[in-house]
Image (cartoon, helix red, strand yellow):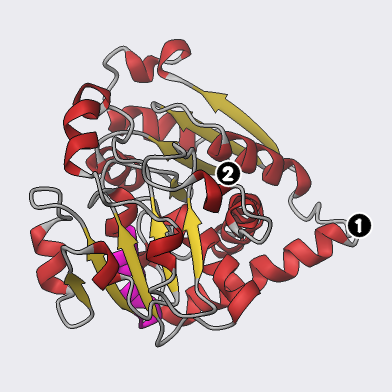
Amino acid sequence: MAETRHFLTLLDFSPAELTSMIARAIAMKQEYKAGGDQRNFPGHVLGMIFAKSSTRTRVSFEAGMAQMGGHAMFLSPNDTQLGRGEPIEDSARVISSMVDIVMIRTFGHDIVETFAAHSSVPVINALTDDYHPCQLLADIQTYVEHRGSITGKVVTWVGDGNNMAQSYINAARQFDVELRIACPEGYEPSAALLEANRDRVSIVREPLAAAEGANLVVTDVWASMGQEEEQRARAAAFRGYQVNGELMSRAASDALYMHCLPAHRGEEISAELMDAADTVIWDEAENRLHAQKALMETLLLANR
């Protein structure tokens, strides 16, 4: 058997593989909506390890595995030894001996790296403090569905230099796009990540300038999970960093805007844009289901 493949960041797959995966996600979505039978993995079990709660991640992975003919098992720190000090290495060896694939949504990125290093089955990063690659698959799928290839386009990120911003930096590299990050001083993504991608990623402090001519504008909440105590300070720092009609008027005439949800209307995005009839945000959310089915299929087939 070939070495087990994992999906911890977008860099774990080549640009060609990612493009192929996006195409497969679109095909699986069309097939599903046409009533097609996608139960190609009967008896397969997905272990879902959640240290951070979620709506979209749990529903999309659980529904996706069911549609593929398998079963998803929800595991939280409250009802496993993962929350009681058992070494990650030991948990990885045991859990991976009993399931076919694992997804982990947690805090430190080192946790998924350690788990994957000791797992005999594929491991998917369903969000860490550093990266959220599954959301990027859905975002790119959404752009491709509505506007075609994203290669060569300009993407503007507005807000915190968080795990989503850092995933967009990897996406800029893998899909060959120009990325402008509009964030206040002190809220930049990883300096090392910025330096490694300085040929295609730039910091632009002024949001309106960053949005000039952009093909895609993306944002996220100002305070991520675990940063609730910083909410007031962040609200002050990010005032003016809102995706709204004025900002979108600076972007390309056919520009799309996205938000990975949950959203705070009136903070990082205006209620007007969130509730617009032509928003693609709801397509973006739904595409988590289909992008992750394509991802799981790819990993399961590679591990046979």
Magenta residues, start to end: 167-177
Mark nearer the viewer, 1 or 2: 1
- How crowded is the residue under tag 1: few (<14 C-alpha within 10 Å), some, or many (20+)? few
Query: x, y (%) of residue 205?
Result: 16, 63
Secondary structure mostly taken by the magenta-highlighted segment of the chain:
helix
Q: Residue at x 55, y 71 (%)?
A: 143
Magenta span includes 173: yes
Query: x, y (%) of residue 83?
Result: 34, 16
In-front residue for pair 30/119: 30
- What element does badge 1 sit on? loop
In-front residue for pair 203/131: 203
**Marks 1 and 2 close (CB-CB < 8 Å):** no
> Where, quadrant-wise, is the C terminus in this rendering?
bottom right
Give amino acid for label 1. Gly
Q: Is residue 36 above or below residue 53?
A: below
Q: Is residue 87 left or right of residue 135?
A: left
Give amino acid for label 2. Asp
- How crowded is the residue under tag 2: few (<14 C-alpha within 10 Å), some, or many (20+)? many
In-front residue for pair 32/43: 32
User: Based on the displayed image, in which of its 4 quarters is residue 25 positioned?
Assistant: bottom right
User: Based on the displayed image, in which of its 4 quarters is residue 110 positioned?
Assistant: top left
User: Based on the displayed image, in which of its 4 quarters is residue 247 positioned?
Assistant: bottom left
Q: Residue at x 63, y 42 (%)?
A: 60
Question: Mark 1 = which residue?
Answer: 35
Q: Is residue 173 above or below residue 161?
A: below
Query: x, y (%) of residue 302?
Result: 55, 64
What number is the disc on residue 254? none
Q: Residue at x 9, y 52 (%)?
A: 185
Query: Separation of disc 1 and disc 2 at Cα?
Result: 26 Å
Question: Can residue 69 be spotted in the picture?
Answer: no
What number is the disc on residue 100? 2
* Mark 1 or 2, nearer chain start: 1
